[in-house]
Image (spheres, rainbow, N blue to C red):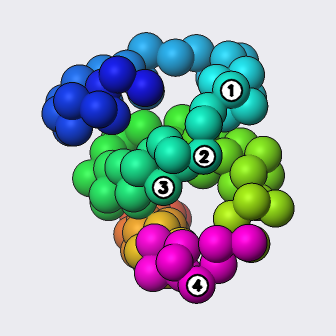
Amino acid sequence: MLCFRLNEVNLIQHVVESIPVSQVNIVCQGLANVYIRKLLAFLASELERTRHVEFYLCWCETLLLEHGPSLKVQSSSMMALLRTLQKSITKRREDLSKLYVLHF
């Protein structure tokens, strides 16, 4: 939470990537609503350039499953952020599917 207050992207990336996949669920459960938007924005931007695609998708899935009901209540303010996240995931999927086709 402190890294979000500092708003340092490199620090946020270091903290997120140092959390083991087995602990992502616990972290998402304990995350305050104030930080959900910031984490989703970070995940959306990081998905565009990271090589840890599966790791970040795990974060997205866990966060959305855990906080989905509260996000529905704020749906109007969250729609732009969710569209950005969807766009990042779709672009990454298209990039990976091109690599798959080229490989075979």
Picture residue at 52% right of the left edge, 17% below the top: 19
* Mark with earlier residue (3, 1): 1
Q: Which residue is mark 4?
A: 76
Using the numbered discs, state the Cα–Cα distance from disc 3 to disc 2 in whole angstroms: 8 Å
> Up-down: is 12 above or below 23?
below
Secondary structure beneath disc 2?
A: helix
Residue 90 visible in the displayed image: no
Q: How many marks?
A: 4
Q: Are marks 4 and 1 in contact (CB under 8 Å)?
A: no
Q: Main secondary structure of the magenta part?
A: helix
Image position of 39 (left or right of 62): left
Using the numbered discs, state the Cα–Cα distance from disc 4 to disc 1 in whole angstroms: 24 Å
Amino acid under label 2? Answer: Asn
Amino acid under label 1? Answer: Gly
Residue 67 visible in the displayed image: yes
Does the magenta-highlighted stretch encompass residue 54?
A: no
- Specify the quadrant of the image occupied by residue 7: top left
Which of these two is toward me, 25 or 68?
A: 68
Q: Which residue is mark 1?
A: 30
Does the magenta-highlighted stretch encompass residue 74?
A: yes
Image position of 8 (left or right of 17): left
Q: Nearer the viewer, mark 3 or mark 2?
A: 2
* Mark with earlier residue (4, 1): 1
Using the numbered discs, state the Cα–Cα distance from disc 1 to disc 2 in whole angstroms: 9 Å
The stretch of residues the image draws in magenta is 73-81
Which of these two is toward me, 24 or 71?
A: 71
Q: Which residue is mark 2?
A: 33
* Mark with earlier residue (4, 3): 3
